[in-house]
Structure formats: C-alpha cells, structure tokens
Image: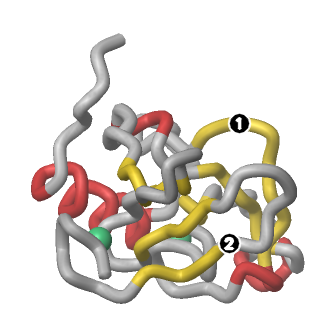
Amino acid sequence: MCEVCGAPLNRRDLPGDEVWNCDGCDALYVRQADGALLRRPFPPADQRWAAAAPAAPAASGGVRVEHAVAYADTLCGIERDAVILLRHFWSAANPRACAECRTVADGRVARWPAETGR
Ligand SMILES: [Zn+2]
Ligand SMILES: [Zn+2]
C-alpha cells in the first residue's frame, strides 16, 4: 500500500530493479537489497511524467496534443496503448499540453510537491 496516499501499489514489469508504482499519486518504490521497499522522492513537475501523443492524430483534429503519461494510462484517462511515448518529459508549460492532463497534474503537484532539489 502506498505510504503517501494509501492506494494499492502495482508491480511494474521492468528488467532490473523491482519497481512498484502508485496510480493514485505517481509515487515510485524500489526494492532495496535488504528487502525494504523504498519510496523515491517526488520529482519536479516537469520531470514527473513522460509526454505522449495520440496514436491516431486524426482523432484530435490533426493537432499533436501532448498528454502526460503515468504507468497505466494518461492523466486524462487515455489507455497507454492508445498513445505513443515521446522522448521527453511532459510539461504543463508546453502550449500543446493536454488541458485535462494539466488540470490533473496541477492537482497532484499541489498535493504532492517535488521533494528533490534541482
Ligand atoms: Zn500513492
Ligand atoms: Zn491528456
């Protein structure tokens, strides 16, 4: 269970470290050598989510909206399979940023501010 928001954790199928994530607050946990599950600090807002574009741009009128992606879906609720990951972080300051994702991201950042310094 997530120590921050109490939501159940999901194990990510990644090579290497055993990583768990929380869909509630986007916390990330990594299994330590001693068996403990340690939460990583929340990154700054513009390094917290990957950016993704719709797999079918026509559906968005040809405009390349950028969504913020968590592990299971985008912050605005689009399935991960329906978007293509871009090679940069999502930023609310990007004029193409999805408005709904921005609203959700703002809420989460306000509730769980960055814990890492720059
Ligand atoms: Zn959580
Ligand atoms: Zn979105």
Q: In the image, 100: left or right of 104?
A: right
Farthest residue, direction top: 118
**Image quadrant in which you'd find residue 66:** bottom right
Tally of marks: 2
In the rendered image, the vertical position of residue 2 relative to residue 82, given as above or below: above
- Using the numbered discs, state the Cα–Cα distance from disc 2 to disc 1 in whole angstroms: 20 Å
Instruction: Give the number of the mark in front: 2 or 1.
Output: 2
Farthest residue, direction front: 34
Query: Foreground residue, 103 or 41?
Result: 41
Pointer 2 with pointer 1, Cβ within 8 A: no
Q: Which residue is mark 1?
A: 88
Coordinates of residue 103 in the picture (x, y in percent) = 28, 65
Disc 1: CA contacts within 10 A as few (<14), some (14-19) or many (>=20): few
| Viewport quadrant of the N terminus | bottom left
Mark 2 / mark 1, whichever is N-terminal: 2
Q: Residue at x 74, y 58 (%)?
A: 64
Disc 2: CA contacts within 10 A as few (<14), some (14-19) or many (>=20): some
Determine whether the residue tagged by mark 2 lies in a helix, strand or loop. Answer: loop
Q: Residue at x 43, y 66 (%)?
A: 101
Coordinates of residue 21 in the picture (x, y in percent) = 50, 68
Q: Which residue is mark 2?
A: 12
Q: Residue at x 11, y 57 (%)?
A: 111
Coordinates of residue 100 in the picture (x, y in percent) = 39, 72
Query: Foreground residue, 19 or 116?
Result: 19
What amino acid is labelled 2 in the image? Arg
